[in-house]
Image: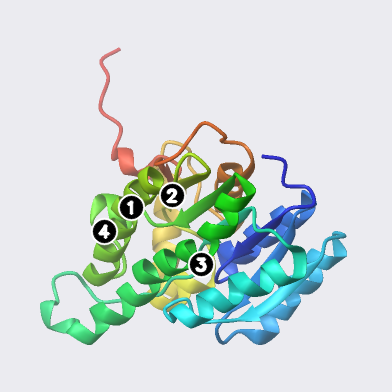
Amino acid sequence: MDIQGGVTIVTGSATGVGAACARLLASKGCNVVINYTKSEAEAKGTQRECEALGVETLLCQADVSVDADCRRMAAAAIEKWGRIDGLINNAGTTQFVNHANLEGLTADDFHRIYAVNVIGPYQMTRAVAEQMKKQGRGAVVNVSSIAGVMGVGSSIAYTASKGALNTMTLSLARALGPEIRVNTICPGFIQGRWLRGGMGDDAYEAAKAAQERNTPLRKAGTPEDMAQAAVWFVEGADLITGEILIVDAGSHLGAAPLIAR
């Protein structure tokens, strides 16, 4: 898909992976809808960076767990540009709770996390689907997590939500073809304030060092690494749908086996 002059909505794009996706899309000439819930100042900063690259942007405060907000965001993009070519469902939330602490999560915690991490991407996909089908093509990329594959991560509620997002990707890929491709990336450790804030400085630095020491690629991922994978699914994967791509420097492979020499 040629995205130059196209339009992509990136949810949760004030900071982190979402902001990196918006900047990369802009660098390729794609107009971007920048979405945020609370981080208005950061979202405006991302908007300025994208516009400095020569594209048009639309700043939209919306909560993806609210269906009316999802439909409003899609309608705003159509009103401004008359098209939607890509959707990157990046907005997400979690609660950091040790998996062994079963009393640490309530039903409300599960509902809140699922509302953003599962229902939000569903509602956003539904909001853009009619326009993409009308155009004859479109791409949806869900930003999931290695947590949804390996059962590890910030909390059991989070891992369960990302597992659900992965299976929903398969269902939507079947349902929305041939016009719309639906794929998912599953990041591993990502450097940045989101993990640092949830884990605390010491645990974050230890995890980062472990990534750089123990993964086959000896690297701790960055938001820009994840953006490369997500944007590739938008522009460079015309024959791929229903794919769940792990982007973790190989950490899911575990320790390398001993090989006799």
Q: Count the numbered circles shown.
A: 4
* Residue drawn where x is 73% and y is 73% of the image: 58
What residue is rendered at 76% in x and 57% in y?
A: 26
Q: Are marks 1 and 2 in contact (CB under 8 Å)?
A: yes
* Viewer can see residue 106: no
Any part of residue 74 in sight: yes
Q: Residue 152 carries which label?
A: 4
Answer with mark 1 or mark 4, whichever residue precedes in sequence. 4
- Classify mark 1: residues with Cα within 10 Å, few (<14), some (14-19) or many (20+): many
* Residue type, mark 2 in image: Thr
Numbered circle sitting on residue 166: 1
Labels 1 and 3 touching (C-beta < 8 A): no
Q: Quadrant of the N terminus?
A: top right
Q: Which of 36 and 181 is in front in this view?
A: 181
Dot 4 crowding, Cα within 10 Å, few <14, some 14–19, many 20+: some
Q: Nearer the viewer, mark 3 or mark 4?
A: 3
Q: Which of 117 and 207 is in front in this view?
A: 117
According to the picture, the residue beneath numbered tag 2 turns out to be 184
Mark earlier in primary sequence (3, 2): 3
Secondary element at image label 3: helix
48 or 16: nearer the eye? 48
- Label 3 belongs to which residue? 127
